[in-house]
Amino acid sequence: MTDVGAAFSRRRRSTSATEVAPPKWETLPTGRTLIMGVLNVTTDSFSDGGRWLRSEAAIAHGVELAAAGADLIDVGGESTRPGARRIPVAEEQSRVIPVIGELARRGIAVSVDTMNASTAEAAVEAGALIVNDVSGGLSDEAMRDTIIRLDAPFLVSHWRGHSATMNSKAIYADVVKEVSHELEYRVAELVVRGVNPDKLLIDPGLGFAKNSEHNWKILGHLDRFTRIGLPVVIGASRKRFMGELVPEGAPMEDRDFVSAVTAALAAGAGAWAVRVHDVETTKAALAVAEQWKTGAR
């Protein structure tokens, strides 16, 4: 574990009398699509860069997202938007570990959005339930063994390269077939090498080495991904292809309505969870989708 993780772990133990036991993987809600609230502790996120950079602000926002109905808070300290620069691991951890630890201490379920194995380990030690790696463990060769050792739930995204180069790799003859096959291959590789298949989740990686047409094709054929047999997470919220559905130059928040509609459709298609910025609107949209499904029975 890094110095940041070890220091925070010691502080948590020293205040354990005031802690609330965080939820466990096994106790997350079932029978409906979960909501993952996005918490970017970054300077350069495409949607809200710098807004939650201070730990106090990030913790308060995480609490707000949970109160609004988020089942998980997905905390990330490194932007993965197209063209984003990589940051030192120590800087990433200084941003996310205190936030994760405090949210977990308050009984809030948390996932960590990281491509770094040492950050994943420190985050799980601090109370994170799930490791969400947009590279599917390909960016850091130590990630696979770290996940095996921690026996942590691992969200594997489809990935073809880092932010600086991924747009040049958005070339497909059949995007649904190729993305699903590449994702299946990555999952098989992880399982063969010892990752617990019962704790794997998948994400087709909307926007990662994919243009708008690719993203919509994947969403329109989500059944191809649910048939893989693992929980599917969809993250369309506020992404560029969502922005194409609102007036040009509109504020980022104007993408929340179309993002919520997309989340509801993804839920209807069998998504295990949707990763969103606007939890309240998404919760309402998912409630409509659930009532629609109930009425059709």
Image (tube, rainbow, N blue to C red):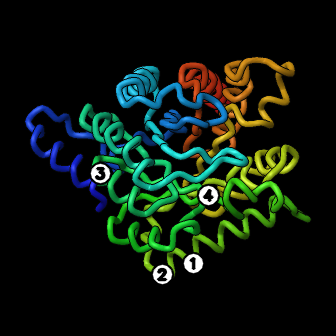
Q: Amino acid at mark 2?
A: Arg
Label pair 4/1, CB-CB below 8 angstroms: no
Where does residue 208 sit, x and y in percent of width and height?
Answer: 72, 52
Residue 30 falls in image quadrant: top left
Q: Amino acid at mark 3?
A: Val
Nearer-N-terminus badge (3/1)? 3
Nearer-N-terminus badge (2/4)? 4
Q: Which residue is mark 2?
A: 193
CA gap between label 2 and label 3 equals 29 Å
Label pair 4/3, CB-CB below 8 angstroms: no
| Residue drawn at point x = 55 percent, y = 54 percent | 231
Dot 3: within a 10 Å radius of its alpha carbon, few (fewer than 14), some, or many (20 or more) residues?
Answer: some
Labels 3, 1: front one: 3
| Residue drawn at point x = 57 percent, y = 66 percent | 139
Q: Nearer the viewer, residue 134 or 70?
A: 134
Nearer-N-terminus badge (4/3)? 3
Q: Which residue is mark 4?
A: 157
Q: Which residue is mark 3?
A: 4
